Image (tube, helix red, strand yellow):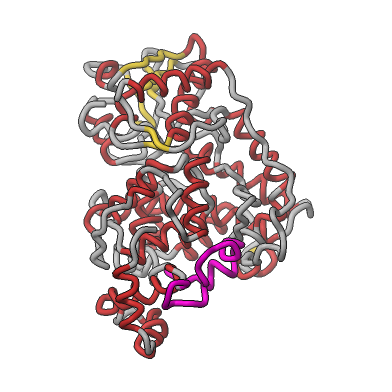
Amino acid sequence: MTQGTGDMMGGPDDGGPGTVSDDGGPDRVRWIFAGQLGSLFDDGGGRMLLIEARSVFGRRPMHRAKAHLLLSGIRHRAAELGDRVEFHQVDTYSAVVDGRDDLDVIDPTSYSARRYVRRLGARVLPSRGFVTSESDFALWAGSRGGKRLLLEDFYRSVRQRTGILMEGETPAGGQWNYDVSNRERPPRGAVTLGLPDPWWPEEDEIDAGVREDLDRWQADGLVQLVGLDAPRRFAVTEREANLALDSFIESRLNDFGPFEDATLTNDWTMAHSLLSAPLNLGLLDPLAVVTRVADEYEAGRAPLASVEGFVRQVMGWRDYVWHLYWHLGEDYRGSHNALGAKETLPREFTELDATTITANCLHHSIDGLRQHGWAHHIQRLMVIGNWALQRGYDPVALNDWFTDMFVDGTPWVMPANVIGMSQHADGGIVATKPYSSGGAYINTMTDYCGGCRYNPRVRLGPDACPFTAGYWAFLDRTEPVLAPNFRMKQPLAGLRRLADRGAVVAQEREREGL
């Protein structure tokens, strides 16, 4: 890929500079990216351009499952389009698009990709793939009169505008948010939730070709892949994505809400939908998805708490972080380090090698990522992210690691999630306080602690939980920065009362390995 072309996870914008509202005439070609692989990005009949640029996969180490998913999605879409597609497998985009004057593009999902398509002179079409457009968000943000742009306020405004889970002017059931009902612990003594397996795709000859190419590219030193080469678990076609959606609604939606934050060692999917990757590939219309899920409540087939929790994730949080990517600006990712975090990511992260990780929760979260290229949000936020926050890992490096290691990682989705929410590197722009906890939370919401050599109730000594002790060491390190934060008043007061504060801090400073 030529310098500054961005990533292949292309996607929507609405009304940026150079954007036009029509899709041109019969001599135009629509260039679709790997985030635009569904019918939502195809108006039918016209010529389409798909480019598989190998150099995209060689910029940084990437999880093999993600590389496979992207290549499989592009190649399956090319096969579906048949004679309508101009499909190229090249080293860089420039080999195909330089000098062309016939390109229409639905805006890509990164700053660098947007600059690239405009520099080419492509006609840029308005965004698709989200419930709300950038102009919607701009109007809402402007109406706030300088107030903080809170997720909950944005989410309510979208509910009101779309009418989803609304009863006239009031929210269904009388509450906007049922998060308090969606925090159940894993069932006592359970090994799994006991739900039917999710729908899994069947690999075909296209997947076999992808696997052969990745093997050859890695052997030739063209790419650096980490993680397990396992059967593809995520949809790459619209048909597959809808089958995955059907399976979620039929077998796991009802349990999604209660166990949204719970984790079991032997149940890597729990009741989660596994739809983030196909959504980010553009295979599903998120408005259609949340409408279908909301209809399950209206029909009396699913509890409101589960339905509302899912709708909030897709129509609320997903749209919100997309808009924040543009609202906060291109410099947001690299210009914030409020907590002075500078530690290099450990080898266990960069190589996805959990064999030497002794903390059971972190071991299973990293090993699950190695196997699947995916983890649910509590594993991401309260295990992996919490560990990184406590130890001061460089937030930009961590942001890029999340982008490269997760099948649903994109440049637009990670900054607000990692720089903001997980690592609090922005000083409170996205989240009002750091998301850190000791081992007690992990012990409550998972079964990890029962098989761990550490005791979540102990902060000092050979059995001291690195999350429990790490929490206090983190507060000690960041106290000068966090002291003005009113939400940190109680935790910091607890730190100051800690009789063994110095010993705990010294212990964590000297702790070796993971």
206, above or below 62, in the image: above
Q: Identify the residue at image location x=35%, y=35%.
A: 108
8, above or below 79, in the image: below
Please tell me whether residue 442 belongs to the stretch shown in magenta: yes
Task: Indicate left or right for 243 with 512 as reference.
Answer: right
Does residue 166 appear in the picture of this structure? no
Question: What's drawn in magenta, residue-wise?
Answer: 436-463
Q: Identify the residue at image location x=29%, y=70%.
A: 509
Q: Main secondary structure of the magenta part?
A: loop
Work out which residue is located at the far right of the displayed protein and give it.
Answer: 300
Q: Identify the residue at image location x=48%, y=45%.
A: 369
Work out which residue is located at the far top of the displayed protein and give it.
Answer: 83
On the image, the x and y values in percent for residue 244 come to: 64, 37
194, above or below 239, in the image: below
Q: Which quarter shows the N terminus? A: top left
Q: Which quarter shows the C terminus? A: bottom left
On the image, the x and y values in percent for residue 242 come to: 64, 34
Q: Quadrant of residue 493?
A: bottom left
Give the camera-side residue of 370 and 52. Answer: 370
Q: Identify the residue at image location x=37%, y=68%.
A: 148
Please tell me whether residue 69 belongs to the stretch shown in magenta: no
Does residue 487 appear in the picture of this structure? yes
